[in-house]
Image (cartoon, rainbow, N blue to C red):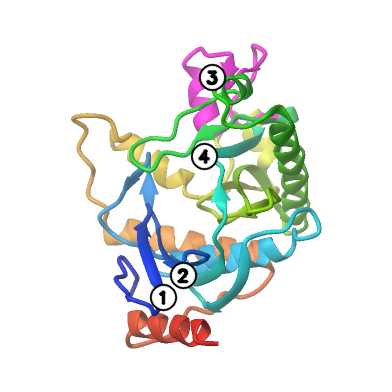
Amino acid sequence: MDSIFKTDFRFTGQTSKYEGKVRDVYTIKDDILVVIASDRISAFDIVMPRSIPNKGQVLNQISVEMLNSTKDIIDNWLISSPDPNVSIGHRLNPIKIEMVIRGYLSGHADRLYKSGKRSICGVNLPNGLVSNQKFDRPIITPSTKAEIGHDEDISKSEILSQNILSIDQYEEIERVTYKLFERGTEIAKERGLILVDTKYEFGYDSNNKLFLIDEIHTPDSSRYFYLDGYEEAVNSGVSPKQLSKEFFRQWLIKNEFQGKENQKLPEITDEIIDDVSKRYVELFNLITGKSFQPRKSDNILKELEVNITKFLSI
């Protein structure tokens, strides 16, 4: 199955290209971003050597739908999606903080809690919590946005003391984060899912107006459980069935890899690739209520270039 691992285009008016962990970002005339969702997959902030067919299309199309469904809460950067793997939007001044919000003790937070920590990003947690338990109220655990290496946890007080944001800016972003998570939770519940945790990124325009940027509520930026069977699983001490790449992280952990020094990356077999791809497609079908239609092209890269060029020429 064909997939997109890397792109290398030169568009009219292009001023720069940035290759992220999973997306390639082209800047046009310094004010427009062309974001291509590749099929690369990362874990523990490391890009894996093999790509996942359909992953980029799933991420892009879910994000476009979710951005459009939250415009009543906050304006966002998106202008159009002229290709299944592409979003084109306004270039804004990004805030170097990711607003991670968690409704449940899972993933990174769970690993920290199991290690004995009872405070995460300045948020105190009680003793006696169990893995994947729902919090009384969602908690926000911000992280720095690292261009290279690992993102790092950061507290509200550190964000303010380092003058990354003012108190007014932080509180506005905090309010929006809770509202977006509430909306995402409602959408997930309608589809028989639980939005466990996610992250949001924000930026300002030249008038200092706040915008939502990046992708939202995708399986790369979010963790989902199936609603059916969740309570029984938690009460039995079993991990709930989930639709996210956390299961891929857990597979790596079981194979003794967490991106640490001197750890060897296990072989990512065709079976694993196929399983991950199917889970991404399954999440698309569930979260959108639509049937995923994979792109059919003999030359995906050429089709990408044509679709983007056509839009930019309008």
Q: Which labelled disc corresponds to residue 13?
A: 1
Between tags 4 and 2, which lies in front? 2
* Mark nearer the N terminus (2 vs 3): 2
Q: Distance between the Cα atoms at labels 4 and 1?
A: 26 Å
Q: Pick the quarter of the image with the C terminus.
A: bottom right
The answer to which quarter of the image holds residue 75 is bottom right
* Mark nearer the N terminus (4 vs 1): 1
Q: Is residue 59 left or right of residue 231?
A: left
Q: Nearer the viewer, residue 283 or 39?
A: 39
* Mark nearer the N terminus (2 vs 1): 1
Residue under numbered circle 3: 113
Residue type marked 4: Lys
* Mark nearer the N terminus (1 vs 3): 1
**Mark 2 crowdedness (10 Å alpha carbons): few <14, some 14-19, many ≥20:** few
Q: Is residue 294 magenta?
A: no
Q: Which labelled disc corresponds to residue 96?
A: 4
Q: Is residue 125 magenta?
A: yes
Q: Which residues are magenta?
A: 106-134
Residue type marked 3: Tyr
Name the spot of residue 77 as percent of width and height, x first: 62, 61
**Element carrying mark 4:** loop
Q: Are marks 1 and 3 in contact (CB under 8 Å)?
A: no
**Element carrying mark 1:** loop
Residue type marked 2: Lys
The answer to which quarter of the image holds residue 53 is bottom left
Q: Residue furthest front?
A: 207
Q: Are marks 2 and 1 in contact (CB under 8 Å)?
A: yes
